[in-house]
Every structure is written in C-alpha cells, then in structure tokens.
Image (cartoon, helix red, strand yellow):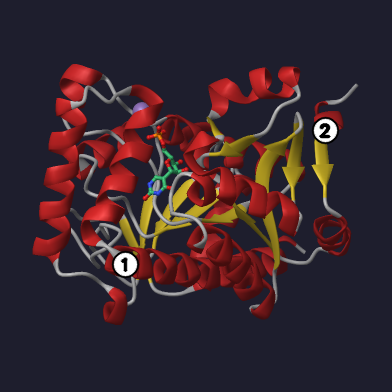
Amino acid sequence: MSHTSYLDISPEVQHALNHGLPIVALESTIISHGMPYPQNVATAMQVEAEVRAHGAVPATIAIVDGRLKAGLSTEHIEALGRGGRDVVKVSRRDIPFIVAAGTTGATTVASTMVIAAMAGISVFATGGIGGVHRNAQQSFDVSADLQELAQTPVAVVCAGAKSILDLGLTLEYLETHGVPVVGYRTHKLPAFFTQDSAFSVDYRLDSSLEIAKVLHAKWAMNLKGGMVIANPIPEEFAMPRAVIDSAIEQALLEAQQQGVGGKESTPFLLARVCDLTGGDSLAANIQLVLNNARLACAIASELRQLSQ
Ligand code: PSU
Ligand code: MN
C-alpha cells in the first residue's frame, strides 16, 4: 500500500494533474476556525470560484471520514463551516489519529501542505500563517506551520501573519530553518489586516514570474521546504492600525485571563479579534484571501510553464 492510498483526489483536481493545469491548494481550518458561519462557507466557495476565474483549479483540503481529500464537495465545505470550532483542528501531529479513527477534521497550513505535497500540488493560498506567539520565550508556543515550511515543498501565499503573533520572532525562526519570506511588491512584512509592519521581508519580488523562477530553482536543486509569499491586503480593504491593535491587545489579555493555550490559542484569538472588530475585520479577511488566491493562480501558472 503506497502512502497515496490514503488520499482521495477529486475528479476536477485529477484532471488538472493529468493535463498539467495550474492548481491552487486551499486550507479548511480557515473555514471552520478562521471565520464565522455562514460567511466562512460563502467565502470558501467564492475563493474556489475566484481560482477558477483566474485559470487554475482549486483543491480545498481536509480529512473527511478518515480520508485525506484534495478537492472537496460543496457538502463537505458546508459541513466544515457549519461545524465551526466543534470541528477537530488537524495539524501535522494529528493526521494519523484522525485517519485511524475514520473521522473528520479541518487542516491547518501545516497539514494542508502535507496533503498538497502528497497530491503533487505546490502552490497554496490562505489568509495568514501561524507563527511564534507573543511570550513564546515562556510558553514555547510556536505553530507547526513554521516547521512544515522548513520541510515540505509548497509555496504559501498569505497576507503575512496577524500581530496576535510576535512577527519579529516568527521571522527569526523562519530564517533559522531556511524558509525564505518574499514580499510581493513590498519590502515590509504585511501584518494581515494592515499592508505593512515594522519588519522587513528577506526579498522583494514584483511579479509572479520572478516568484515562480525562484521556486523552480529552489526545487530543481532539491532544496527542501517551502516559501512564504507575503501579499499585502489591498489598500482599500486595509484596517486602521489602532483599531486592529487594540482588538488584538484585548483578545490577548482575555486569553491570558482565561488560561487559553495549546491548539485552542489561535482559534480563540481569531474569534475574539473578529468579534471585537465586528464586520470590518471579516470583510478585510475575505478580501485578502481572494487577493492571495489571485496571486497564487498567477504563480501556479508560471510554475507550470517553467516545469514543462
Ligand atoms: N491565522 C489566521 N487565520 C487562520 C489561522 C491562522 O489569520 O485561519 C489558522 C491556520 O489554519 C493556521 C492555524 O495554520 O490557524 C495555526 O494554528 P496554530 O497556531 O495552532 O498552529
Ligand atoms: Mn500553537
């Protein structure tokens, strides 16, 4: 039995693989834990439509009834969205338990990368990656997303990371593990809701072709691991820094007071920031994901051409 016998590739994704068409992987924890219902389901469907409209095939990834899925049905997306934070959040360590039990889970950036790589998909779009949490000097809370980027050959297009994290320590960690952080048309690390932060990226690249050339060269040389492609939220959807900063401070304080830790930490903070800023942050969140999907399509298309 090969490892891919655990994997179901949808007919649409399989067709794209057979014909060398560009494919963009999408994660499912952003659906269950990253946004409220029903906007989460609507957004997941809208992102898939955006990918198709930009000439690529979407592969939304999750684990359903113990099967690794690359390409989800509308019913599965609906179930993950409706289940919300009751759905099991699956990172790399959790995959074999969910598979062995034959149950269902939403995949994080880390586990989505694992399954995308298994399916032969190398470009992935999402909102924000996990990272080194603030006060990680004490808590040791470092997202498994960062180690995955160090070992699995998938490029992750995101809007940087939310400042619920320590962005400086996140960059240091990625540097140590050899993960490049590319700014798309920017020198600054975007901070999800805002176009920039106080931190610089490693490399600025201004076109999807340049990004694809770097990915192609990296993987042609068998340099392991992925890459972070940080794409700033479009200016018209960015949020005032003071508004978002105060919501994040408040959410962090509540998490500390309530003793929230481990894998609950990120979903708790995401939900509180969303509540505290109301519909504004959700609207921004949706727009930045669409924006990342478009850039991922362009990179996936260029990469296909370079690989032919
Ligand atoms: N950050 C966001 N939105 C998200 C997540 C992070 O702005 O939806 C999700 C992603 O699935 C990410 C995960 O991979 O949270 C990280 O969780 P943890 O910190 O527990 O590794
Ligand atoms: Mn964590």
Task: Say which quadrant the N terminus sits in.
Answer: top right
Residue at 19% x, 42% y is 251
All told, the count of numbered labels is: 2
Can residue 72 be seen here? no
Quadrant assignment, res 58: bottom right
- The three-letter amino acid code for the residue at tag 2 is Thr
Q: Which is nearer the eye, 281 or 201? A: 281
Task: Say which quadrant the C terminus sits in.
Answer: bottom right
Residue at 88% x, 57% y is 11
Query: For ligand 2, which image quadrant applies?
Result: top left
- The three-letter amino acid code for the residue at tag 1 is Gly
Tell me which numbered mark, 1 or 2, is placed earlier along the sequence: 2
Q: Which residue is mark 2?
A: 4
Q: Residues within 10 Å of mark 2 (few under 14, many from 20)?
A: few
**SS for callout 2:** helix
Residue 94 position within the rendered picture, expressed as x and y whole percent measured from the top left:
58, 22
Q: Which residue is mark 1?
A: 279
Q: Nearer the viewer, mark 1 or mark 2?
A: 1
Residue 264 position within the rendered picture, expressed as x and y whole percent measured from the top left:
37, 29
Residue 143 position within the rendered picture, expressed as x and y whole percent measured from the top left:
38, 31
- For the residues labelled 1 and 2, the Cα–Cα distance comes to 41 Å
Lateral position of residue 227 relative to residue 51, left or right: left
Q: Residues within 10 Å of mark 1 (few under 14, many from 20)?
A: few
Lateral position of residue 245 relative to residue 170, left or right: left
Cβ of disc 1 within 8 Å of ligand 1?
no
Residue at 69% x, 74% y is 52
Residue 287 position within the rendered picture, expressed as x and y whole percent measured from the top left:
42, 72
**SS for callout 1:** helix
Looking at the image, is 215 positioned above or below residue 102?
Answer: below
Can residue 109 be seen here? yes
Residue at 12% x, 45% y is 249
